[in-house]
Image (cartoon, rainbow, N blue to C red):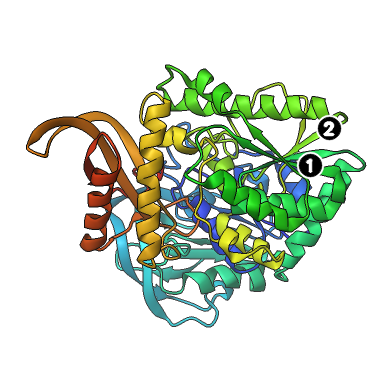
Amino acid sequence: MREVVIVLDFGSQYTNLIARRIREQQVYSEILPCDVSFDEIEKRNPKGIILSGGPSSVYEEGSPKCNPLVFSGKYPVLGICYGMQLMAYMLGGKVIKGEKGEFGKALLKIERDSMLFDGLEREFIAWMSHNDIVIKPPDNFRITASTDNTPVSAMEDPDRNLYAVQFHPEVVHTINGDKIIRNFLYKICSCSGDWTPEHFINEAIENIRETVKDGRVICALSGGVDSTTTAVLVHKAIGDNLICIFVNQGTLRQNEVEQVLNTLKNFNMRVEYVDATDRFLERLKGITDPEKKRKIIGYEFVSVFEEIATRLGNIDFLAQGTLYPDVIESATSSQKAHKIKTHHNVGGLPEKMRLKLVEPLRYLFKDEVRKVALSLGIPERIVYRQPFPGPGLAIRIIGEVTRERLEIIRKADYIISTEIEKAGLSRELWQYFGVLLPEMSVGVMGDKRTFGHVVAVRAILSEDGMTADWARLPYSLLETISNRIINEVPKVNRVVYDISSKPPATIEWE
Protein backbone atom coordinates (compact mmCIF):
# COMPACT_ATOMS: atom_id res chain seq x y z
CA MET A 1 0.00 0.00 0.00
CA ARG A 2 1.39 3.38 -1.02
CA GLU A 3 2.19 6.14 1.46
CA VAL A 4 -0.38 8.92 1.56
CA VAL A 5 -0.59 12.37 3.07
CA ILE A 6 -4.16 13.65 3.39
CA VAL A 7 -5.16 17.24 2.66
CA LEU A 8 -8.34 18.28 4.44
CA ASP A 9 -10.13 20.88 2.32
CA PHE A 10 -11.62 23.90 4.10
CA GLY A 11 -12.45 25.70 0.86
CA SER A 12 -9.12 27.29 0.00
CA GLN A 13 -8.32 28.31 -3.56
CA TYR A 14 -4.93 26.69 -2.92
CA THR A 15 -6.08 23.25 -1.72
CA ASN A 16 -5.29 21.57 -5.03
CA LEU A 17 -1.93 23.31 -5.12
CA ILE A 18 -1.06 21.84 -1.71
CA ALA A 19 -1.80 18.36 -3.05
CA ARG A 20 0.40 19.01 -6.08
CA ARG A 21 3.28 20.32 -3.99
CA ILE A 22 3.21 17.15 -1.90
CA ARG A 23 3.29 14.98 -5.03
CA GLU A 24 6.20 16.99 -6.41
CA GLN A 25 8.13 15.66 -3.41
CA GLN A 26 7.28 12.09 -4.59
CA VAL A 27 4.67 11.55 -1.88
CA TYR A 28 1.10 10.65 -2.82
CA SER A 29 -1.57 13.08 -1.60
CA GLU A 30 -5.33 12.85 -1.46
CA ILE A 31 -7.85 15.64 -0.87
CA LEU A 32 -10.73 14.87 1.48
CA PRO A 33 -13.56 17.10 2.75
CA CYS A 34 -12.67 18.78 6.03
CA ASP A 35 -15.51 17.08 7.90
CA VAL A 36 -14.63 13.56 6.80
CA SER A 37 -15.00 11.01 9.59
CA PHE A 38 -11.90 9.97 11.50
CA ASP A 39 -12.68 6.36 10.54
CA GLU A 40 -12.24 7.31 6.88
CA ILE A 41 -8.92 8.94 7.69
CA GLU A 42 -7.74 5.88 9.60
CA LYS A 43 -8.68 3.60 6.69
CA ARG A 44 -6.03 5.37 4.63
CA ASN A 45 -3.43 5.11 7.41
CA PRO A 46 -1.86 8.44 6.41
CA LYS A 47 1.73 9.41 7.10
CA GLY A 48 0.44 12.89 7.89
CA ILE A 49 -2.42 15.37 7.51
CA ILE A 50 -2.40 18.92 6.15
CA LEU A 51 -5.21 21.35 6.91
CA SER A 52 -5.82 23.78 4.04
CA GLY A 53 -6.66 27.45 4.25
CA GLY A 54 -10.18 28.71 3.76
CA PRO A 55 -12.33 31.85 3.56
CA SER A 56 -14.19 31.41 6.88
CA SER A 57 -13.46 32.66 10.39
CA VAL A 58 -13.10 29.87 12.96
CA TYR A 59 -15.06 31.73 15.64
CA GLU A 60 -18.15 32.20 13.44
CA GLU A 61 -21.15 29.93 13.86
CA GLY A 62 -21.21 27.22 11.22
CA SER A 63 -17.57 27.65 10.20
CA PRO A 64 -16.02 24.40 8.92
CA LYS A 65 -14.35 22.16 11.47
CA CYS A 66 -12.57 18.82 11.37
CA ASN A 67 -12.91 15.86 13.69
CA PRO A 68 -11.11 16.71 17.01
CA LEU A 69 -9.27 13.36 16.83
CA VAL A 70 -7.20 14.85 14.01
CA PHE A 71 -5.26 16.63 16.77
CA SER A 72 -4.90 13.55 18.99
CA GLY A 73 -1.26 13.08 18.06
CA LYS A 74 -1.81 9.84 16.16
CA TYR A 75 -0.74 11.50 12.90
CA PRO A 76 1.53 14.50 12.27
CA VAL A 77 -0.53 17.56 11.31
CA LEU A 78 0.40 20.77 9.49
CA GLY A 79 -2.17 23.58 9.58
CA ILE A 80 -1.95 26.27 6.88
CA CYS A 81 -3.62 29.69 7.33
CA TYR A 82 -7.22 28.81 8.32
CA GLY A 83 -5.81 25.39 9.25
CA MET A 84 -3.52 27.05 11.78
CA GLN A 85 -6.32 29.18 13.20
CA LEU A 86 -8.56 26.10 13.49
CA MET A 87 -5.83 24.16 15.28
CA ALA A 88 -5.40 27.01 17.75
CA TYR A 89 -9.14 27.50 18.25
CA MET A 90 -10.04 23.82 18.73
CA LEU A 91 -7.16 23.25 21.16
CA GLY A 92 -7.94 26.20 23.45
CA GLY A 93 -5.97 29.04 21.90
CA LYS A 94 -7.44 32.42 20.93
CA VAL A 95 -8.19 33.69 17.43
CA ILE A 96 -9.48 37.19 16.66
CA LYS A 97 -9.95 39.46 13.69
CA GLY A 98 -6.73 41.42 13.23
CA GLU A 99 -6.62 45.21 13.29
CA LYS A 100 -5.67 45.00 9.63
CA GLY A 101 -5.36 42.19 7.15
CA GLU A 102 -2.08 40.89 5.83
CA PHE A 103 -2.06 40.07 2.15
CA GLY A 104 0.90 39.44 -0.14
CA LYS A 105 4.58 39.23 0.66
CA ALA A 106 5.82 39.59 4.24
CA LEU A 107 9.23 39.17 5.84
CA LEU A 108 9.05 36.05 8.01
CA LYS A 109 11.43 35.83 10.98
CA ILE A 110 12.30 32.44 12.48
CA GLU A 111 12.10 32.90 16.27
CA ARG A 112 13.48 29.53 17.37
CA ASP A 113 14.73 26.24 15.98
CA SER A 114 12.03 24.04 14.47
CA MET A 115 12.17 20.85 12.44
CA LEU A 116 9.71 22.52 10.05
CA PHE A 117 12.25 25.24 9.27
CA ASP A 118 15.34 23.06 9.44
CA GLY A 119 18.07 24.22 7.06
CA LEU A 120 16.37 27.52 6.21
CA GLU A 121 17.61 31.07 6.60
CA ARG A 122 16.40 32.93 9.69
CA GLU A 123 14.50 35.45 7.56
CA PHE A 124 12.75 35.00 4.20
CA ILE A 125 9.74 36.21 2.23
CA ALA A 126 6.45 34.38 2.86
CA TRP A 127 3.04 34.84 1.25
CA MET A 128 0.26 35.94 3.58
CA SER A 129 -3.49 36.03 2.91
CA HIS A 130 -5.52 36.50 6.09
CA ASN A 131 -7.62 38.85 8.22
CA ASP A 132 -7.76 36.74 11.39
CA ILE A 133 -4.78 36.09 13.65
CA VAL A 134 -3.83 33.76 16.50
CA ILE A 135 -3.06 35.95 19.53
CA LYS A 136 -2.69 33.09 22.02
CA PRO A 137 -1.44 29.63 21.02
CA PRO A 138 -2.88 26.60 22.85
CA ASP A 139 -1.15 25.28 25.95
CA ASN A 140 2.15 23.48 25.26
CA PHE A 141 2.56 25.24 21.90
CA ARG A 142 5.54 27.47 21.21
CA ILE A 143 5.82 30.31 18.72
CA THR A 144 8.41 29.56 16.02
CA ALA A 145 8.03 32.45 13.53
CA SER A 146 6.59 35.95 13.26
CA THR A 147 6.14 38.94 10.96
CA ASP A 148 5.76 42.59 11.91
CA ASN A 149 1.96 42.32 11.58
CA THR A 150 1.51 38.73 12.81
CA PRO A 151 3.39 37.85 16.01
CA VAL A 152 2.23 34.23 15.78
CA SER A 153 3.11 33.34 12.17
CA ALA A 154 4.04 29.76 13.04
CA MET A 155 3.58 27.57 16.10
CA GLU A 156 4.15 23.97 17.09
CA ASP A 157 3.73 21.27 19.69
CA PRO A 158 6.42 18.78 18.60
CA ASP A 159 5.48 16.31 21.37
CA ARG A 160 2.17 15.73 19.54
CA ASN A 161 3.61 16.38 16.08
CA LEU A 162 1.33 19.40 15.58
CA TYR A 163 2.70 22.20 13.39
CA ALA A 164 1.05 25.27 11.92
CA VAL A 165 1.92 28.27 9.74
CA GLN A 166 -0.13 31.38 9.04
CA PHE A 167 1.45 31.86 5.60
CA HIS A 168 1.09 29.74 2.46
CA PRO A 169 4.15 27.52 1.79
CA GLU A 170 2.42 25.99 -1.27
CA VAL A 171 2.58 29.17 -3.40
CA VAL A 172 5.72 30.10 -5.31
CA HIS A 173 5.85 33.53 -3.64
CA THR A 174 6.98 31.89 -0.38
CA ILE A 175 10.71 31.58 -0.93
CA ASN A 176 11.30 28.40 1.07
CA GLY A 177 7.84 26.91 0.66
CA ASP A 178 8.97 23.72 -1.05
CA LYS A 179 11.60 23.12 1.64
CA ILE A 180 9.04 23.61 4.42
CA ILE A 181 6.70 21.08 2.82
CA ARG A 182 9.60 18.70 2.29
CA ASN A 183 10.66 19.04 5.93
CA PHE A 184 7.14 18.19 7.04
CA LEU A 185 6.94 15.18 4.74
CA TYR A 186 10.36 13.68 5.33
CA LYS A 187 11.57 14.92 8.74
CA ILE A 188 8.25 14.99 10.58
CA CYS A 189 6.08 12.41 8.76
CA SER A 190 9.04 10.11 7.90
CA CYS A 191 7.88 9.59 4.31
CA SER A 192 10.09 7.52 2.01
CA GLY A 193 8.98 9.09 -1.29
CA ASP A 194 7.54 6.14 -3.20
CA TRP A 195 5.26 8.15 -5.50
CA THR A 196 7.06 7.64 -8.83
CA PRO A 197 5.68 6.85 -12.32
CA GLU A 198 7.08 3.33 -12.13
CA HIS A 199 5.49 2.71 -8.74
CA PHE A 200 2.17 4.04 -10.01
CA ILE A 201 2.28 1.85 -13.14
CA ASN A 202 2.91 -1.33 -11.16
CA GLU A 203 0.21 -0.47 -8.64
CA ALA A 204 -2.31 0.50 -11.35
CA ILE A 205 -1.76 -2.74 -13.27
CA GLU A 206 -2.20 -4.76 -10.08
CA ASN A 207 -5.39 -2.86 -9.16
CA ILE A 208 -6.85 -3.29 -12.66
CA ARG A 209 -6.22 -7.04 -12.57
CA GLU A 210 -7.76 -7.28 -9.12
CA THR A 211 -10.83 -5.30 -10.21
CA VAL A 212 -11.41 -6.85 -13.63
CA LYS A 213 -10.21 -10.40 -12.97
CA ASP A 214 -11.35 -12.44 -16.01
CA GLY A 215 -13.81 -9.79 -17.16
CA ARG A 216 -13.68 -7.93 -20.48
CA VAL A 217 -13.27 -4.16 -20.77
CA ILE A 218 -14.10 -1.61 -23.41
CA CYS A 219 -12.10 1.62 -23.33
CA ALA A 220 -13.29 4.99 -24.54
CA LEU A 221 -10.48 6.27 -26.78
CA SER A 222 -10.01 9.79 -28.07
CA GLY A 223 -6.36 9.63 -29.14
CA GLY A 224 -5.27 12.03 -26.38
CA VAL A 225 -2.75 11.28 -23.65
CA ASP A 226 -5.37 10.50 -20.98
CA SER A 227 -7.35 7.86 -22.86
CA THR A 228 -4.25 6.42 -24.57
CA THR A 229 -2.44 6.03 -21.24
CA THR A 230 -5.57 4.43 -19.77
CA ALA A 231 -5.76 1.99 -22.67
CA VAL A 232 -2.08 1.02 -22.47
CA LEU A 233 -2.31 0.45 -18.71
CA VAL A 234 -5.43 -1.69 -19.04
CA HIS A 235 -3.91 -3.58 -21.99
CA LYS A 236 -0.79 -4.35 -19.95
CA ALA A 237 -3.02 -5.63 -17.16
CA ILE A 238 -5.50 -7.79 -19.08
CA GLY A 239 -4.19 -8.07 -22.65
CA ASP A 240 -6.74 -9.12 -25.27
CA ASN A 241 -9.62 -8.79 -22.82
CA LEU A 242 -9.52 -5.07 -23.68
CA ILE A 243 -11.42 -3.68 -26.68
CA CYS A 244 -10.89 0.01 -27.46
CA ILE A 245 -13.78 2.01 -28.89
CA PHE A 246 -13.22 5.23 -30.81
CA VAL A 247 -16.52 7.09 -31.20
CA ASN A 248 -16.86 9.96 -33.64
CA GLN A 249 -19.63 12.05 -32.12
CA GLY A 250 -19.37 14.64 -34.90
CA THR A 251 -17.62 17.25 -32.76
CA LEU A 252 -14.00 16.25 -33.39
CA ARG A 253 -11.33 18.51 -34.86
CA GLN A 254 -10.28 18.56 -38.49
CA ASN A 255 -8.54 15.34 -39.67
CA GLU A 256 -8.80 13.92 -36.13
CA VAL A 257 -10.42 10.62 -37.06
CA GLU A 258 -7.66 9.67 -39.49
CA GLN A 259 -4.88 10.80 -37.12
CA VAL A 260 -6.24 8.86 -34.15
CA LEU A 261 -6.85 5.63 -36.06
CA ASN A 262 -3.38 5.73 -37.62
CA THR A 263 -1.76 6.33 -34.23
CA LEU A 264 -3.61 3.51 -32.45
CA LYS A 265 -2.48 0.92 -34.99
CA ASN A 266 0.97 1.02 -33.40
CA PHE A 267 -0.19 -0.33 -30.02
CA ASN A 268 -1.46 -3.74 -31.20
CA MET A 269 -4.76 -3.20 -29.46
CA ARG A 270 -8.14 -4.07 -30.86
CA VAL A 271 -9.88 -0.83 -31.90
CA GLU A 272 -13.44 -0.46 -33.12
CA TYR A 273 -14.43 2.79 -34.86
CA VAL A 274 -18.01 4.01 -34.58
CA ASP A 275 -19.34 7.00 -36.52
CA ALA A 276 -22.23 8.28 -34.38
CA THR A 277 -22.31 11.82 -35.79
CA ASP A 278 -25.99 11.81 -36.77
CA ARG A 279 -27.06 10.36 -33.44
CA PHE A 280 -25.22 12.94 -31.32
CA LEU A 281 -26.19 15.97 -33.42
CA GLU A 282 -29.83 14.95 -33.37
CA ARG A 283 -29.76 14.79 -29.56
CA LEU A 284 -28.04 18.20 -29.38
CA LYS A 285 -30.55 19.89 -31.67
CA GLY A 286 -31.99 23.01 -30.02
CA ILE A 287 -29.83 22.63 -26.86
CA THR A 288 -28.02 25.81 -25.75
CA ASP A 289 -27.36 25.23 -22.04
CA PRO A 290 -23.71 24.12 -21.50
CA GLU A 291 -24.55 21.69 -18.69
CA LYS A 292 -27.25 20.04 -20.78
CA LYS A 293 -24.80 19.65 -23.67
CA ARG A 294 -22.28 17.93 -21.44
CA LYS A 295 -24.85 15.65 -19.85
CA ILE A 296 -26.37 14.70 -23.22
CA ILE A 297 -22.95 13.89 -24.67
CA GLY A 298 -21.93 11.95 -21.55
CA TYR A 299 -25.17 9.99 -21.61
CA GLU A 300 -24.91 9.22 -25.33
CA PHE A 301 -21.28 8.12 -24.97
CA VAL A 302 -22.23 5.58 -22.34
CA SER A 303 -25.29 4.50 -24.35
CA VAL A 304 -23.11 3.86 -27.38
CA PHE A 305 -20.59 1.91 -25.31
CA GLU A 306 -23.27 -0.17 -23.65
CA GLU A 307 -24.83 -0.99 -27.03
CA ILE A 308 -21.43 -2.05 -28.34
CA ALA A 309 -20.86 -4.08 -25.18
CA THR A 310 -24.18 -5.86 -25.74
CA ARG A 311 -23.24 -6.61 -29.35
CA LEU A 312 -19.79 -7.86 -28.36
CA GLY A 313 -21.21 -9.86 -25.47
CA ASN A 314 -19.85 -10.43 -21.95
CA ILE A 315 -18.47 -6.91 -21.47
CA ASP A 316 -18.46 -5.86 -17.83
CA PHE A 317 -16.34 -2.72 -17.58
CA LEU A 318 -15.87 0.70 -19.18
CA ALA A 319 -12.36 2.22 -18.90
CA GLN A 320 -11.93 5.96 -19.29
CA GLY A 321 -9.28 8.61 -18.67
CA THR A 322 -10.82 10.57 -15.83
CA LEU A 323 -8.24 12.80 -14.07
CA TYR A 324 -8.17 14.31 -10.60
CA PRO A 325 -9.05 17.86 -11.77
CA ASP A 326 -12.18 16.38 -13.41
CA VAL A 327 -13.17 14.88 -10.08
CA ILE A 328 -12.37 18.05 -8.12
CA GLU A 329 -14.15 20.45 -10.50
CA SER A 330 -17.23 18.24 -10.57
CA ALA A 331 -17.26 18.68 -6.77
CA THR A 332 -17.23 14.98 -6.01
CA SER A 333 -14.18 15.27 -3.74
CA SER A 334 -15.47 17.77 -1.20
CA GLN A 335 -18.82 18.77 0.21
CA LYS A 336 -17.42 22.28 0.74
CA ALA A 337 -16.47 22.75 -2.91
CA HIS A 338 -18.60 24.58 -5.44
CA LYS A 339 -19.29 22.66 -8.64
CA ILE A 340 -17.60 24.58 -11.44
CA LYS A 341 -18.89 22.43 -14.28
CA THR A 342 -19.90 18.85 -14.95
CA HIS A 343 -17.24 16.82 -16.71
CA HIS A 344 -18.84 14.35 -19.09
CA ASN A 345 -16.82 11.48 -17.64
CA VAL A 346 -17.62 12.32 -14.02
CA GLY A 347 -20.90 14.15 -13.44
CA GLY A 348 -22.27 13.60 -16.94
CA LEU A 349 -22.65 9.84 -16.62
CA PRO A 350 -26.08 8.30 -16.18
CA GLU A 351 -27.00 7.40 -12.60
CA LYS A 352 -27.69 3.80 -13.62
CA MET A 353 -25.00 2.14 -15.69
CA ARG A 354 -24.72 -1.54 -16.52
CA LEU A 355 -20.99 -1.22 -17.09
CA LYS A 356 -18.70 -0.77 -14.10
CA LEU A 357 -16.03 1.93 -14.36
CA VAL A 358 -12.27 1.42 -14.52
CA GLU A 359 -10.47 4.75 -14.04
CA PRO A 360 -6.76 4.14 -13.36
CA LEU A 361 -5.84 7.84 -13.74
CA ARG A 362 -8.60 9.16 -11.49
CA TYR A 363 -6.20 10.56 -8.89
CA LEU A 364 -3.51 11.94 -11.22
CA PHE A 365 -2.92 15.48 -12.42
CA LYS A 366 -2.18 16.02 -16.11
CA ASP A 367 1.58 16.47 -15.69
CA GLU A 368 1.69 13.19 -13.73
CA VAL A 369 -0.18 11.43 -16.55
CA ARG A 370 2.44 12.65 -19.01
CA LYS A 371 5.25 11.25 -16.84
CA VAL A 372 3.45 7.92 -16.63
CA ALA A 373 2.84 7.93 -20.39
CA LEU A 374 6.53 8.50 -21.14
CA SER A 375 7.45 5.68 -18.76
CA LEU A 376 5.03 3.42 -20.68
CA GLY A 377 6.78 4.27 -23.95
CA ILE A 378 3.91 6.28 -25.45
CA PRO A 379 5.24 8.59 -28.21
CA GLU A 380 5.79 12.24 -27.36
CA ARG A 381 3.41 13.41 -30.10
CA ILE A 382 0.60 11.86 -28.06
CA VAL A 383 2.02 12.68 -24.63
CA TYR A 384 2.19 16.39 -25.40
CA ARG A 385 -0.95 16.61 -27.54
CA GLN A 386 -2.94 19.47 -26.07
CA PRO A 387 -5.97 18.59 -23.93
CA PHE A 388 -9.25 18.28 -25.79
CA PRO A 389 -12.55 18.09 -23.89
CA GLY A 390 -14.70 14.98 -24.16
CA PRO A 391 -17.66 16.93 -25.57
CA GLY A 392 -15.28 18.23 -28.23
CA LEU A 393 -16.19 21.26 -30.31
CA ALA A 394 -19.74 21.16 -28.91
CA ILE A 395 -18.61 23.23 -25.93
CA ARG A 396 -16.56 25.54 -28.13
CA ILE A 397 -19.75 26.64 -29.82
CA ILE A 398 -21.67 29.00 -27.57
CA GLY A 399 -25.31 28.18 -28.14
CA GLU A 400 -26.82 25.54 -30.37
CA VAL A 401 -24.59 22.98 -32.08
CA THR A 402 -25.36 22.63 -35.79
CA ARG A 403 -23.46 21.14 -38.72
CA GLU A 404 -22.85 24.59 -40.18
CA ARG A 405 -21.54 26.04 -36.92
CA LEU A 406 -19.36 22.97 -36.36
CA GLU A 407 -17.79 23.42 -39.78
CA ILE A 408 -17.03 27.08 -39.01
CA ILE A 409 -15.29 26.41 -35.71
CA ARG A 410 -13.55 23.29 -37.06
CA LYS A 411 -11.89 25.31 -39.84
CA ALA A 412 -11.06 28.23 -37.55
CA ASP A 413 -9.62 25.91 -34.89
CA TYR A 414 -7.45 24.20 -37.51
CA ILE A 415 -6.01 27.56 -38.59
CA ILE A 416 -5.27 28.53 -34.96
CA SER A 417 -3.50 25.23 -34.28
CA THR A 418 -1.56 25.30 -37.54
CA GLU A 419 -0.21 28.82 -37.00
CA ILE A 420 0.71 28.28 -33.34
CA GLU A 421 2.54 25.06 -34.19
CA LYS A 422 4.27 26.77 -37.12
CA ALA A 423 5.44 29.49 -34.69
CA GLY A 424 7.01 26.80 -32.46
CA LEU A 425 4.82 27.61 -29.46
CA SER A 426 2.82 24.40 -29.15
CA ARG A 427 4.96 22.91 -26.35
CA GLU A 428 4.95 26.16 -24.38
CA LEU A 429 1.17 26.44 -24.31
CA TRP A 430 -1.20 24.27 -22.31
CA GLN A 431 -4.10 24.76 -24.70
CA TYR A 432 -5.03 26.79 -27.76
CA PHE A 433 -8.29 26.76 -29.66
CA GLY A 434 -11.15 28.77 -31.13
CA VAL A 435 -14.61 29.49 -29.77
CA LEU A 436 -17.61 30.39 -31.93
CA LEU A 437 -19.64 33.13 -30.24
CA PRO A 438 -23.42 33.44 -30.48
CA GLU A 439 -23.30 37.13 -31.45
CA MET A 440 -23.18 38.29 -35.06
CA SER A 441 -20.98 41.20 -36.06
CA VAL A 442 -21.30 43.95 -38.69
CA GLY A 443 -18.34 44.19 -41.06
CA VAL A 444 -17.22 45.38 -44.47
CA MET A 445 -15.77 42.99 -47.04
CA GLY A 446 -15.27 43.89 -50.68
CA ASP A 447 -16.98 47.28 -50.16
CA LYS A 448 -20.10 45.45 -49.00
CA ARG A 449 -21.72 45.35 -45.59
CA THR A 450 -21.52 41.93 -43.93
CA PHE A 451 -23.20 40.47 -40.90
CA GLY A 452 -20.99 37.57 -39.85
CA HIS A 453 -19.88 35.28 -37.06
CA VAL A 454 -17.32 36.13 -34.35
CA VAL A 455 -14.51 33.71 -33.42
CA ALA A 456 -12.63 34.06 -30.13
CA VAL A 457 -9.07 32.77 -29.91
CA ARG A 458 -8.01 31.19 -26.60
CA ALA A 459 -4.38 30.35 -25.72
CA ILE A 460 -3.38 29.68 -22.14
CA LEU A 461 -0.44 28.68 -19.95
CA SER A 462 -0.90 26.16 -17.15
CA GLU A 463 0.76 23.28 -15.28
CA ASP A 464 -2.27 21.12 -14.57
CA GLY A 465 -5.40 22.90 -15.78
CA MET A 466 -6.50 23.85 -12.25
CA THR A 467 -5.21 27.41 -12.69
CA ALA A 468 -4.21 29.12 -15.92
CA ASP A 469 -3.01 32.40 -17.36
CA TRP A 470 -3.63 33.77 -20.84
CA ALA A 471 -0.67 33.54 -23.19
CA ARG A 472 0.94 36.74 -24.46
CA LEU A 473 1.07 35.65 -28.09
CA PRO A 474 3.04 37.89 -30.47
CA TYR A 475 0.87 40.49 -32.21
CA SER A 476 2.20 39.33 -35.57
CA LEU A 477 0.96 35.78 -34.86
CA LEU A 478 -2.46 37.03 -33.76
CA GLU A 479 -2.63 39.13 -36.90
CA THR A 480 -1.85 36.12 -39.10
CA ILE A 481 -4.46 33.98 -37.32
CA SER A 482 -7.09 36.70 -37.63
CA ASN A 483 -6.40 37.34 -41.31
CA ARG A 484 -6.50 33.65 -42.19
CA ILE A 485 -9.74 32.97 -40.33
CA ILE A 486 -11.53 35.96 -41.87
CA ASN A 487 -10.28 35.16 -45.36
CA GLU A 488 -10.61 31.37 -45.27
CA VAL A 489 -13.60 30.60 -43.05
CA PRO A 490 -16.93 31.51 -44.69
CA LYS A 491 -19.32 33.79 -42.77
CA VAL A 492 -16.72 34.97 -40.21
CA ASN A 493 -15.85 38.68 -40.21
CA ARG A 494 -14.38 39.28 -36.75
CA VAL A 495 -11.74 37.62 -34.52
CA VAL A 496 -11.16 38.51 -30.84
CA TYR A 497 -8.57 37.31 -28.31
CA ASP A 498 -9.48 36.07 -24.83
CA ILE A 499 -7.22 37.57 -22.13
CA SER A 500 -8.93 36.01 -19.10
CA SER A 501 -7.09 33.91 -16.54
CA LYS A 502 -8.42 30.95 -14.52
CA PRO A 503 -9.76 31.88 -12.03
CA PRO A 504 -11.97 33.86 -12.44
CA ALA A 505 -12.69 32.40 -15.90
CA THR A 506 -12.44 28.73 -16.82
CA ILE A 507 -10.27 27.44 -19.66
CA GLU A 508 -13.21 26.43 -21.80
CA TRP A 509 -16.03 28.90 -22.39
CA GLU A 510 -18.67 26.28 -21.59
Q: Residue 118 sits in which quadrant?
A: bottom right
Location of residue 245 in the rendering, given as x and y in whole percent from the top left corner: 70, 39
Work out whether residue 451 or residue 235 is closer to the camera in this orientation and state it: 451
Asked if residue 378 lies left or right of residue 455, the reply is: right
| Lower position in the chain sequence, tag 2 or tag 1 | 1
Q: Tell me the residue at 54%/46% (across/down).
A: 256
Q: Which amino acid lies under the numbered mark 2 shown in the image of this protein? A: Ile
Q: Which amino acid lies under the numbered mark 1 shown in the image of this protein? A: Ile
Residue farthest along the right direction in this orientation: 214
Residue farthest along the front direction in this orientation: 446
Q: Secondary structure at mark 2?
A: loop
Q: Tell me the residue at 86%/44% (across/down).
A: 241
Marks 2 and 1: which is nearer the front?
Answer: 1
Q: Given contact means CB atoms under 8 Å apart, are the residues at marks 2 and 1 in contact?
A: yes
Q: Residue 267 sits in which quadrant?
A: bottom right
Q: Is residue 474 above or below residue 304?
A: below
Location of residue 391 in the rendering, given as x and y in whole percent from the top left corner: 52, 35
User: Which quadrant holds the N terminus?
Assistant: bottom right
- Residue designated by label 2: 315
- Residue designated by label 1: 243
Location of residue 412 in the rendering, given as x and y in whole percent from the top left corner: 35, 44
Tell me, yes or no, if residue 140 can be seen here.
no
Work out whether residue 119 or residue 334 is closer to the camera in this orientation and state it: 334
Work out whether residue 67 or residue 331 is closer to the camera in this orientation and state it: 331
Asked if residue 242 lies left or right of residue 348, the reply is: right
